[in-house]
Amino acid sequence: MTKITPAVPMTLAVLTLLAGAAGAQDAQAPKDNITAVRDEDGRYYTADDVPTFKIAEDGTVDWLTYSGFRRYHAECHVCHGPEGEGSSYAPALKKSAIALDYYAFIDVVTNGRKKVNVAEHSVMPAFGENVNVMCYLDDIYVYLKARGADALPRGRPAKKEPKSDAIRDAENSCLGNN
C-alpha cells in the first residue's frame, strides 16, 4: 500500500486554489466587446463572434450601423430618446450595448423586462413578435454600441457601406419576402 505524506494533499490543494484564482482573473479580464476582428458579408464581429460596428476613418459606417440608426429611430427612440441618450420615460441605451452581454440584450428586447419596487418602476415591453424590431435586432445593437463607444456622433450617418446581398437575403427571409 502506498502511503501519501500529508504534504501532497496540501500541495494539491494549493495548486488547485492557485489555478482557480488564475482562472478567476482571466474570467474577470474585460473582453473587447467593440473591435471588429472579422467581416462576413458586410457584418462585423468581435473575437467572441458578437456583432459589432465598423467605422472607416472617413466616417463611412457599415450597413448594419446605418440600418440600426434608422430602425432605432423607427421603433425605440420614442421611449429611449434620440440617439440612445435616454428620456424622462426610459433609460439611455447607448451604454447598454457595451455593458450588457449581447445575449442578455437580445433577451430583454425579445422578452421584455419588468422592474417594479419601492425605488423603481420600469417596464420594457416584449418585442419578440415585432418583425420591425426582431429582423433588425443586430442592426439596432451595433448602432447603440457605436453610440456607446462614442465612435458615432449624433445624427444620421452621412456615409454608409452598401447593403450586401447576404444582408438583403436575410432581411427578405426574416420579413417573409422570399
Image: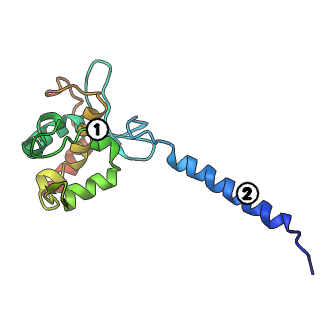
Q: Amino acid at mark 1?
A: Lys
Q: Please give the label number shown on residue 68.
A: none
Q: Where's the C terminus, which quadrant?
A: bottom left
Residue 152 in the image, given as x and y percentages of width and height:
25, 27
Nearer to the camera, 134 or 111:
111
Residue 77 in the image, given as x and y percentages of width and height:
10, 41
Residue 62 in the image, given as x and y percentages of width and height:
27, 32
Q: Which residue is mark 1?
A: 145
Is the residue marked by circle 1 packed among few (<14), some (14-19), or many (20+) residues within 10 Å? many
* Residue at left offset 91%, top offset 75%: 3
Residue 160 in the image, given as x and y percentages of width and height:
21, 28
Exactly how many numbered labels are in the figure? 2
Q: Secondary structure at mark 2?
A: helix
Q: Please give the label number shown on residue 15.
A: 2
Nearer to the camera, 92 or 60:
92
Q: Amino acid at mark 2?
A: Leu
Closer mark to the observer between disc 1 and disc 2: 2
Is residue 26 visible in the rendered image? The answer is yes
* Residue at left offset 25%, top offset 29%: 61
Residue 9 located left or right of residue 20: right
Q: Quadrant of residue 15?
A: bottom right
Query: How far separated are the C-alphas under marks 1 and 2?
Result: 40 Å
